[in-house]
DNA sequence: CGACGCTTTGAAGGCCCTCAAATCAGGTGG
DNA sequence: CCACCTGATTTGAGGGCCTTCAAAGCGTCG
């Protein structure tokens, strides 16, 4: 290690083996709505997807573009965000491998209502509307599972609304850190490291506040020994204290 | 008219004919996810629903109750709201006839995540999980339509998030009035009357503000001749001006 | 008519945004 | 390996939007 890096984040690199048939099948099987499929059906479904590699910060699709593909993240992290007329961005979600995104006219939306970009280097599978409709028509189970996933997402969105409408910034940020730790956290020593580049601006866009306020809150949490944090990384050192703040 | 009522709202009364077979079929057919069914299938589906009458302010189900029925509103208006620990309520949605609400474990949620109550007297159809699963399994079209409806709801929730995170109260209230007018508005003279009891507190709970602030904004709009308003009613007199405020 | 509850209005104060500038980490190229 | 440069983060001061608390006004219903 001759490097001077101080970030504790692992920096995974996208390699060819991430898109072998085996990995693809594994990730497809991970997607909740394909979980009921056996290996053979999975093979059939796999053939309908095309794989793409995208570099960090590359845009995958833009808000208002015509909805053309449903996508599944195989490797990396994808960021979904809304642009508002006022210029402020809202970070809707950060996705991990196995999650789906994008939409299709078939699913009731003619245009993407958010922009998706590669938060890190990514490998992504895409399927068009015709092929996906074929899958849904022949596997009602998958359609039902998809309904369930969407219900979860709706619930999550409503939680966000509740927080925005009734919680002060400190509480919202605490709740956001907990949810990110739940999704991207890995145990490291006695800490819970959020394995994901996460800037103050990212945090601000998730919680609907400003970079400066997010910074102030994070500094405060660090003073209280609840977290350790640096440039684009966070590690939670006192989970209970953070929960306390988020519930207060 | 010997009454001293000054509210311009019509006060529809729940009567027996609202739950005749014909009305039930009509409303079932109205629900987006049953739109593809022919009359005969609709008859079959209808047999699986049970009708209930509820009085204004009666609770239909409570947040955290075990999810047991999917419901369809046939007559009246239903109000969905979240309770927060801090005691503040968030009004998620006001439903009109033809909309569905409630959920089922089948759809990915074991418990209701909001409370539903009758905003006016209502007639409601309910179906249990077993029967609904049977419908979904035999009609993939319906499952797909349901996915579309949920996508719409998710989109709407994200719009709300965007507004809460980046718009001042006045803009949020203007947007809310427009959306309510779109859903419940009826032309009356040169105005657009929102045919729904709507208190300042209701408005505040939808927009994530307080009764007092909602009142101040509404008074301001009335001063500007954009709306006419009174106890639990609103009528929009200058739609363009309201749009202007909401877009600013 | 009388009372309850919805609505309005006022004043004070706090939370958070805005604007501005300094500091710092990490990558780059010499 | 070091100096520089870019972009992220921190910190401060000021001010505005909204909430909170209080109290008065007024429509509706019994």
Image: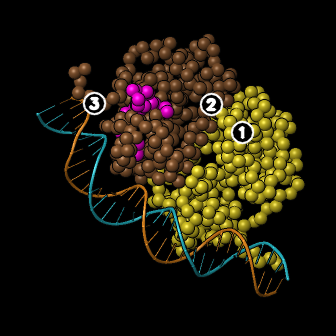
Chain colours: A yellow, B brown, C cyan, D orange
Label 1 is found on which chain of the structure?
A
Residue B202 magenta-highlighted: yes
The residue singled out by tag 1 in the image is A67
Q: Which region of the structure is painted magenta?
A: B182-204
The residue singled out by tag 3 in the image is B6
Picture residue at 73% right of the left edge, 47% below the top: A61
Whether residue B10 sits left or right of residue B176 in the image: it is left
Marks 3/1 in contact by CB < 8 Å: the verdict is no
Secondary element at tag 2: helix
x and y percentages locating residue B78 in the rendered image: 44, 32
Do we see residue B36 in this rendering? yes
Label 3 is found on which chain of the structure?
B
Of residue A206 and residue A146, the one placed in the foreground of this image is A206
Picture residue at 55% right of the left edge, 34% below the top: B103
Sequence-first disc among 3 and 2: 3
Whether residue B202 sits left or right of residue A151 in the image: it is left
x and y percentages locating residue B104 in the rendered image: 57, 33
The residue singled out by tag 2 in the image is B146
Residue B72 magenta-highlighted: no
């Amino acid at each position: 290690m001759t490097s001077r890096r101080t970030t504790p984040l692992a920096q995974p690199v996208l390699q060819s083996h991430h898109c072998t048939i085996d990995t693809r099948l594994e990730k497809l099987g991970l997607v909740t709505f394909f979980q009921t499929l056996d290996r053979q059906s999975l093979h059939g479904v796999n053939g309908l997807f095309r794989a793409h590699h995208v570099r960090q910060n590359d845009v995958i699709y833009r808000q208002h573009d015509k909805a053309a593909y449903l996508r599944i993240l195989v490797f990396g992290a994808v960021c979904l965000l809304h642009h508002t007329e006022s210029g402020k961005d809202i970070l809707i979600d950060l996705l991990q491998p196995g999650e789906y995104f994008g939409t299709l006219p078939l699913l009731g939306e003619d245009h993407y209502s958010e922009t998706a970009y590669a938060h890190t280097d990514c490998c992504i599978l895409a399927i068009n509307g015709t092929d996906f409709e074929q899958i849904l028509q022949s596997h009602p189970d998958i359609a039902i599972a998809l309904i369930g996933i969407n219900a979860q997402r709706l619930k999550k969105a409503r939680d966000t609304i509740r927080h925005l409408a009734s919680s002060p910034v400190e509480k919202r940020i605490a709740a956001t850190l907990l949810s990110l730790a739940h999704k991207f956290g890995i145990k490291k020593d006695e800490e819970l490291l959020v394995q994901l580049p996460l800037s103050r601006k990212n945090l601000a866009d998730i919680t609907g506040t400003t970079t400066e306020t997010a910074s102030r809150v994070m500094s405060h949490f660090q003073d209280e020994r609840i977290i350790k944090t640096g440039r684009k990384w966070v590690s939670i050192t006192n989970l209970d204290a953070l929960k306390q703040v988020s519930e207060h």
